[in-house]
Image: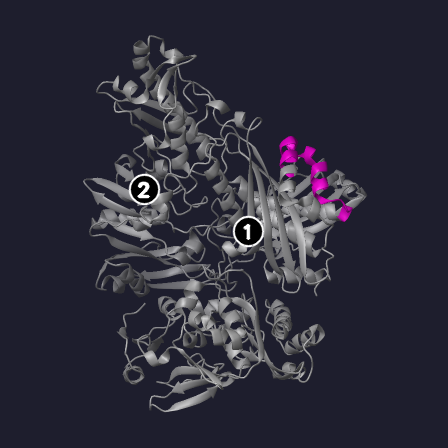
Amino acid sequence: MNAFEYAQPATLDEAQALLTSASGPVAVLAGGTDLLTAMKQGIVNPARVVSLKSIEELRGIEVSSDAVRIGAMTTLSELAAHPDVARLYPCLVTAIKGIGSPQIANMGTVGGDLCQHPRCWYYRNGFGLFGMNNGASLVLEGDNRYHAIFGNDGPAKFVNVSSLAPGLIALDATFNVRGADKQMRDIPAADFFKTPSAPEESLTSLAAGEVLTHITIPAAQTRNATYEVRERHGLDWPLVTASVAYTDAGGSAQNVRVVLGHVAPTPWVVDAAAKTLEGKAIDEAAAAACGTSAVADAKPLSMNGYKVQLAKVAVKRALLAAAG
Amino acid sequence: MAKNAWPSADKRSLIGKRISRLDGPVKSTGRAKYAYDISRPGMIYARLLWAPYGSAKVVSIDTSAATQIKGVVGAWPEMKDGDEVRFAGQVVASLAATSEEIAHEALKSIKVVYEVQTPQMNDVLLEKAETKEQRDEIPDAATVDKTFNEAEVKIEGHYGAAAITHCCMEAHGQVAEYRDNAMYIWPSTQNVSAYAAGLADAAGMPASQIHVDCQYMGGGFGSKFDSDQWGAICTRIAKETGKPVKLMLERDHELMAAGARPSAFANVRAGASKDGRITVWDSTAWGSGGMGGSRALGVPYIFGNIPNIRRVSRSVRTNRGSQRPWRAPGHPQSCLVTMAALEDLAAAAGVDSLEFFLKNLDYTERPDVYREELRIAADLIGYKDKAHPRGDSTPGPLKRGLGISLHTWGGAGHKSESTVTINPDGSASVNIGTQDLGSGTRTVVGIVVAETLGLPLENVQVNIGRNEYPASGASGGSTTVGGVSTSTRDAATAALNALFEKVAPALGVGADQLEAWQGSIHVVGDASKSMPWVKACSLLGQIPVTGKGSKPASDGTQLDNSGVGGVQMADVTVDIETGRVTINEFVAVQDCGLIVDLKTAESQVYGAMIMGVTYALYEESIYDPVTGRMLNADMEFYKLAGLADVGTLKVHMMTGPGYDERGVIGLGEPPVISPGAAISNAVANACGVRVPTIPLTPNRVLAALEQGGKLA
């Protein structure tokens, strides 16, 4: 990796000053499980790295009657171990356990999980965010078994690999970000993720100098779950995940959200499929129908048609898991 | 007079017992120094620049900018202008610097211009492979066709295994240090005694001045027999700069260039009578081991005496790093193709798989051994209770199934020499130029010496891993244990007999009436006449005695043997909605003659089963068809099984009468041969369709289910 400046400020003010004053590219260091690899691979080459590890206000979980507020630097292990999180949001706990590595869950943070770089092997092997070679897409011509089946019309064919994002979107979470001008703004979880149409475009809606500080999730009692399919039983990336949440109104589902992970350049919200369940009891037939509906618009590439089947099944099983 | 022949069961204190490996504590505490851990004063670090294209011509290499970087000691082109790049990962240039980080970064400043060409990457579709050569053919077309056409039961199927790489935990590489007109090398190698020969040119000195030291190995699996191009580069830089040099491959380069097991595919036709008697085998096989192609597939595996056989093998050249011997070269692929096709035949005949294999054992070389092993494996896995015809009819998406496979291997000992020294203070040591790949060789050598001298294991100093010790063969092909146990038994016996010559007068008998047993020297048949070991050794006076031993043994006694049989059975669950395979239980029954250390033998089998689950379910070298780059040259997407993946493993070693008296036989290869076949057969039994190729990943399982009309 290139030589770089390293700063570990104690306050957000200092951190944001460091982020905006750099003369070259900057990178925010949270747990480092993604950033350090990306720097070693030479796909991220910051002139300055600003660590958020010493900023106390970014850590911890606050529970009030109407919301749970999670600091972006809270580790994934801390989140999974929190009793209120476990009680209210099993979909998040399952997603964290699905990482299959206590070491990564101990180091990785909530904010870092949401801001990861794609794992696309063309990107990681130096062919750029879109995996291009002489103007042609290597993803289309080559091995795309792990690539997107939705939202892949543009140049981005990679998948978003956040473990938490599908669950947070399903739970109607809000991402709290702080601008370089110290003003806070709230971004609905689903709006945080962007599909870039040019390689220099951001994968999130964070502006320059903005820092994701907290995630706020409504504390309303919902039924929610995550189902994940991966190749290995231990540490592995999922092939497909589905996170679902709904309000149980006396046996019928309301406000149903169904969100897929690892299928598109962003977490993939399938509202149309979710709507088919409104007011219904979640049973095997309804869940299966929702799964089928969720993948109706999938556009698999040459080698990843099997992920359509996996997405269908993941939606069904997540719904049945939520229904209990 | 001590004899070379192995002691009878009642006279074995150590041989055949469960003994923990001698180097377990130093390895588990991190004190063991691997090549990677060697650090020398003033050491510099070498790194290699590799070509990122499967096929290209080198137009120019410019190292001048790299040599200007602070900390860079030197940079050297390793190819000439106009040379052809034949695989991504081929070494183009080298560089040395004062730190690993500088070396790594400075590589980017070496400018190479390539004329990029289209690589040949396809090995799956024979009709689209651009280069193929016929490797062998056994034509008997008329009889084979007639027998097949008239067979009561017949199958036609496609089977195969993707190319994989060795993925040693410790990458290839070494440290080299030039001083006092000699070269000192610390490599990671399977071939200590012969390693220096490959470096003489690079070192500019005869092999006799090159000292090799490899005490611990982080895996080789057949990929570390040679000193390799990188060994030569490291040695050359050490000589040229006068500084110690460390050159270990980086993980991506290791996976691309330093290992490869050829792919193998086959179209098979086979026939049987309706009661499950095989009548005919007819196959066309092909595979690729990179630019070197691959050798013919040995099918039908084990069942070589099937009456009507025709087979054709073709070799496909691809622009990949060349194949290296991978643990039991050719056998896992041949075994998969054969056992899968035969299992399909059994299913087509409606005959239980176990019964089918039993019924056709006379087509193998060792039917009695396989019969006994099948019975034991069936008991261990609960075959009778779990077996069902192909396709688990239980409702729901989770389908359970059993699979069987059989295998064989040679395993005779390689050439070996050693010396055993008994000192006047009673201590004993053995010197032998072998190596311990993690298989337990150090421990086995110690056990043989201690058993021969009648001493506790801790009283024997075992010296291995240096080329100044008596030469012993490369550790490959399961040849080590037969070689080193023979030469050390021979050497220890010679040393003991020299000691007996000194002791015999004191006990008033001839040397030929003595034996060493449990810390004393006894007169055979007279318990009252004995002398404690230490006292006996003191009779040596000032001079130790050293016995020399060899394989073959000096007196011609054969202490090793060849030819083993093994049976494995897998119990799996397949989720037919997701295509995911879970190993429930996995049983291995194995014979390997006289077992020296039961614990390390069992460990070998456990390790092979884990390696087998890995290649059966996950492992695959994935290449980009456009650029020729290996896409998963890492340990993130080159997937190895973890503990959560392997299920419950059960190992049963065949020992006792009928096995022990055969002598010592190697065990490294055999248990890694059957896992792919046994697991593939279990998956077919569970979900009702054959998944043609391994690894059995969800995409492949779902595709097979869809094709078979079984997708939920």
Q: How is the image coloured?
A: one colour
Q: Residue furthest left?
A: B180
Look at the numbered disc 1 and give the secondary structure of its residue: helix
Horizontal arrangement in the rendering, residue B354 relative to residue B675 (left or right): right
Pointer 2 or 1: first along the chain: 2
- Mark 2 or 1: in front is 1
Residue B364 counted in the magenta span: yes
Tell me the chief SS of the magenta region.
Answer: helix
Q: Residue at x 36, y 74 (%)?
A: A30
Q: Residue at x 29, y 55 (%)?
A: B46
Horizontal arrangement in the rendering, residue B445 relative to residue B680 (left or right): left
In the image, are marks 2 and 1 on the same chain? yes
Look at the numbered disc 2 and give the secondary structure of its residue: helix
How dense is the environment of label 2, judged by Cα within 10 Å: few (below 14), some, or many (20 and up)? many
Observer-nearest residue: B599 or B275? B599
- For the N terminus of chain B, give its image quadrant: top left
Amino acid found under the numbered disc labelled 2: Leu
Amino acid found under the numbered disc labelled 1: Val
Q: Position of residue A151 (x, y in %)?
A: 56, 79
| Displayed quadrant of residue A213 | bottom left
Magenta part of the chain: B348-374
Find disc 1 in the rendering and name its residue. Answer: B613
Find disc 2 in the rendering and name its residue. Answer: B199
